């Protein structure tokens, strides 16, 4: 009796037994029946997607820590607006470490086939630890400001990807950042810095995309308008690839598997930081329109891997090469656009030099589907 | 004897009811069909099994692995036991339940390109267009892909 009942139950469940398997692969199924299919909707179009196959995953949320080893900070003479009155003499000091937290998040707002729009925000904090304390031995406002306040950037950004058809696209990236020696509560909105890039691109295959465009950028510290080149590719075996947005960054990618990737390359980092100092402890620079033009290249190796599912750890180490850390005085509050000396050749209020230390960066990331 | 027959009849009735349930059209069955993700690299056939909806890969633009020349398998699956399962026939959409608000949810979507499984909700924008949103925990942390319904194309004259 029991046997009959069991057989009956088995029979009853046959109809839904296949749901427990991973595949419905049936040796009798003729998959060629799906070859001759087209869109059911007349006039429907295919659009290219923002990603290519094999590209490293986008980071939705990132929380990281950046550390640079010790190096010399050679602060130059700081002159007043007249160009001749010396406000502070040059002096050298040594940092033992430069470090800080870096956080960012990006949220897709619109994800359609014909439009992808993403919004994000970021906060980078950089503290300078001097050894010894520069306040008495080296009376230069650059050292004292960096030592006491550090520099930080808080900003918002947006990315728009507009495919034109299955092969062509437009990419727009824009950001607005507040950067300076201020605490967040003191940062005046007047000093917002805007960056943007517009790129026309093509995606000839699922494993390659390239583009050309223009950018307004502070990557080398001061404002510039430059051409940019986008190039992302993955080889046929999904082992090697390139992820390039020249000149901002360029990396060669080695994919161990889709959850383990190694990169070698560089990134340019930079921004203009509003310089301010608390008059209670020394120089009062509140009436001076001074900004640090920070630009640096990071030559690096990066290892990114999945810790668990969508939680990825990124570890990078390399060499931080200083390009510029000069202080500029704004003319009537306006920035000076030098175009690498082609348009103007105004002297900096203070010309500084930084040593080039080793650095490392570690971040925990939630990556996008 | 009568008791055995009664049990057998009951079992057969359950079996018939089960099969009949699958044959009966349900409100969510408008999802059934063959669909193409936005990247155009695969085609996915969605069926109903019992009360839930499942989608399996039935076509690949690149059916063979360029490294081996053999039909592609799920080599990126983190479970070693599944790495040799053929991608054709692979069930990448699982366990979707049609809801009163017109969506299909409670299911998951699997991405063979990276071996990850995401929570997923499906919305039908019109009879030929689906918004497939894969997400991590909450829908805000996700990405939507638009899938288009496919149909047999008339032979060209």
Image: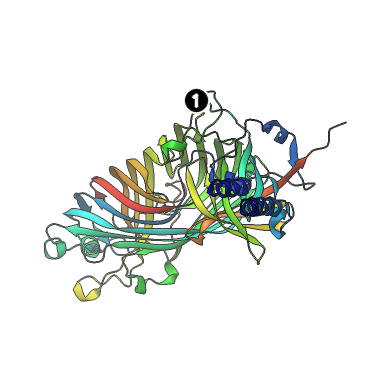
Residue B93: x and y in percent read 58, 48
The relative height of residue A189 versus residue B63 in the rendered view (above or below) is below
Based on the displayed image, in which of its 4 quarters is residue A287 positioned? bottom left
Chain ID for label 1?
A: B
Viewer-side residue, B157 vs B24? B24
Q: Residue at x 83, y 37 (%)?
A: B154
The relative height of residue B152 versus residue B117 in the rendered view (above or below) is above
Residue A108 appears anywhere in the view: yes
Based on the displayed image, in which of its 4 quarters is residue A222 positioned? bottom left
Residue B156: x and y in percent read 84, 32
Among all residues in the image, which is located at the extreme right?
B157
Check the image and tell me how it is coloured: rainbow
Residue B23: x and y in percent read 72, 51
Q: Residue at x 13, y 57 (%)?
A: A131
Viewer-side residue, A369 vs A194? A369
Among all residues in the image, which is located at the extreme front?
B1
How crowded is the residue under tag 1: few (<14 C-alpha within 10 Å), some, or many (20+)?
few
The relative height of residue A140 versus residue B83 in the rendered view (above or below) is below
Viewer-side residue, B54 vs A319? B54
Residue A177 appears anywhere in the view: no
Q: Residue at x 24, y 55 (%)?
A: A98
Q: In the figure, is residue A312 to the left or right of A244?
A: left
For disc 1, the marked residue is B67
Viewer-side residue, A67 vs B76? B76
Determine whether the residue tagged by mark 1 lies in a helix, strand or loop.
loop
Residue A7: x and y in percent read 58, 45
Q: How many marks?
A: 1
Among all residues in the image, which is located at the extreme top?
B69
Q: In the figure, is residue A282 to the left or right of A329?
A: left
Q: In the figure, is residue A135 to the left or right of B119?
A: left
């Amino acid at each position: 009796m029991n046997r009959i009942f069991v057989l009956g139950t088995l029979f009853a469940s046959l109809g839904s037994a296949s749901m427990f398997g991973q595949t419905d692969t049936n040796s009798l199924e003729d998959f060629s029946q799906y070859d001759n299919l087209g869109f059911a909707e007349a006039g429907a179009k295919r659009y290219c997607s923002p990603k290519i196959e094999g590209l490293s995953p986008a980071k939705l949320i990132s929380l990281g820590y950046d550390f640079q080893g010790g190096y010399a900070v050679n602060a130059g003479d700081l002159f007043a607006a007249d160009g001749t009155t010396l406000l502070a003499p040059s002096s050298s000091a040594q940092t033992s470490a430069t470090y800080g937290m870096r956080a960012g998040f990006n949220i897709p707002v619109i994800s359609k086939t014909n439009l992808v729009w993403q919004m994000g925000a970021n906060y980078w904090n950089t503290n300078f630890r001097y050894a010894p304390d520069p306040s008495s031995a080296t009376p230069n406002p650059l050292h004292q400001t960096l030592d006491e306040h550090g520099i930080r950037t808080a900003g918002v950004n947006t990315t728009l990807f507009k495919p034109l058809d299955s092969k062509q696209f437009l990419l727009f990236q824009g950001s607005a950042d507040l950067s300076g020696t201020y605490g967040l509560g003191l940062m005046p909105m007047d000093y917002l810095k805007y960056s943007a890039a517009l790129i026309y691109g093509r995606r000839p295959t699922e494993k390659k995309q390239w583009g050309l465009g223009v950018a307004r950028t502070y990557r080398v510290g001061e404002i510039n308008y430059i051409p940019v080149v986008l190039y992302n590719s993955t080889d046929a075996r999904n082992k090697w690839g390139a992820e390039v947005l020249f000149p901002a960054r360029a990396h060669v990618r080695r994919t161990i598997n889709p959850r383990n990737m190694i990169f070698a390359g560089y990134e340019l980092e930079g921004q203009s930081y509003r310089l301010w100092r608390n008059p209670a402890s020394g120089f009062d620079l509140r009436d001076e329109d001074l900004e640090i033009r920070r630009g640096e290249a990071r030559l690096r190796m990066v290892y990114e891997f999945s810790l668990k599912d969508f939680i990825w750890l990124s570890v990078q180490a390399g060499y931080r090469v200083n390009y510029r850390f000069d202080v500029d005085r704004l003319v009537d509050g306006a920035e000076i656009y030098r175009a690498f000396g082609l348009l103007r050749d105004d002297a900096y209020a203070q010309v500084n030099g930084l040593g080039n230390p080793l650095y490392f960066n570690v971040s925990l990331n939630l990556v996008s589907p | 004897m009568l008791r055995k027959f009664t049990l057998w009849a009951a079992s057969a009735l359950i079996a018939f009811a089960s099969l009949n349930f699958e044959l009966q059209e349900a409100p969510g069955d408008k999802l059934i069909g063959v669909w193409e993700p936005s990247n155009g690299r695969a085609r996915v056939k969605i069926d109903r099994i019992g009360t839930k909806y499942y989608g399996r890969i039935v076509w690949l633009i690149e059916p063979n692995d360029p490294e081996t020349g053999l039909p592609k398998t799920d080599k990126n699956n983190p479970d070693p036991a599944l790495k040799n399962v053929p991608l054709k026939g692979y069930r990448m959409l699982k366990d979707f339940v049609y809801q009163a608000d017109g969506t299909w949810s409670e299911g998951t979507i699997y991405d063979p390109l990276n071996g990850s499984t995401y929570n997923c909700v499906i919305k039908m924008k019109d009879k030929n267009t689906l918004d497939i949103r894969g997400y991590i925990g909450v829908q805000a942390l996700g990405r939507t892909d638009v899938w288009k319904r496919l149909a047999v194309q008339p032979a060209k004259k």
